[in-house]
Image (cartoon, helix red, strand yellow):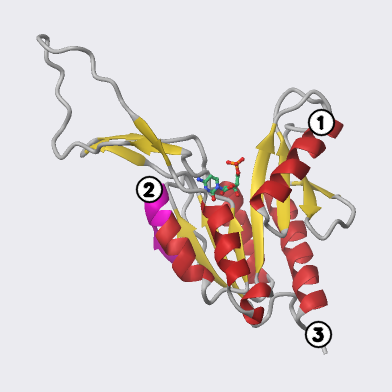
Amino acid sequence: DFQLPLAGRTVTISAGGTREPLDPVRFLGNRSSGKQGVALAVAARNAGATVRLLAAHMEVPPPAGVEVVTVETALQLREAALAAAADSDVVIMSAAVADFRPAVVSDTKIKKRDDSADPVITLVRNPDILHELVEVRNAAGDEARQRLIVGFAAETGDSHGDVLAYAEAKLQRKGCDLLVVNHVGSDKVFGQDTNSVVILARSGSEPQEASGTKAEVSEAIINRIGFELNSVSP
Ligand code: C5P
């Protein structure tokens, strides 16, 4: 019998970049396009999964055939992710989450006034959603333990070995099951036209390389997730 690798599975994917408001018209944001998350959503859908896309700001439209939950801030994404995780088999955190947000959000547009000092923006730390998902999962029962949590990391380093070492430390710190590592920077092998990633597993199996278009890399990641799920809970 032919079965798609994620048939019957629910996969939650966060994508895009959060925006942290300063006042009603201004925010702190980042350059995440959401393309990687959207490509993952397409690959998961094509692999037979029910897909829920937690969409922060994206430059590309969400794909057809997936449920979309729109969020703006890290705190909204956290709420949506914790709610969605409860009935998901897989959570993939591919969103670029702001590490900090303005401590105070002004109700009215911040004005420039010649008689006042230049404004100072105080930032406070946002929660690490990925880490929190892992803690909630680990505190829950056996069924929840079969849930798979996948993080992303963009690392810089002088060598492939350095990057793998940083990523390995991050994998242990965050406690997620898989960490998809992008080597960003001037390295010849990485950061070129095609996307190239290494998938690290907390189970300690060999790092797996995947490269190609974002669609091809996403298929490799989704296939790996299918393999992990099917080797634990068929
Ligand atoms: O620590 P770093 O930002 O490199 O980790 C990246 C991973 O952690 C990504 O999967 C990202 O979605 C997630 N993350 C998060 N909450 C944050 C910051 C990052 O879930 N506040």
Q: Which one is nearer the viewer's eye here, 131 or 158?
A: 131
Amino acid residing under circle 1: Asp
Q: Which one is nearer the viewer's eye here, 89 or 176?
A: 176
* Residue, disc 3: 2
Mark closest to the chain's N terminus, 3 or 1: 3
First to last magenta residue range: 68-77
Tell me if I can see residue 66 in this picture. no
Q: Position of residue 131 (x, y in %)?
A: 58, 54
Q: Up-down: is 20 above or below 92?
A: above
* Residue, disc 1: 162
* Residue, disc 2: 73
Q: Position of residue 204 (x, y in %)?
A: 85, 56
Q: Quadrant of residue 166?
A: top right
Q: Up-down: is 125 above or below 133?
A: above
Amino acid residing under circle 3: Phe
- Tags 3 and 1 in contact by the CB under 8 Å rule? no
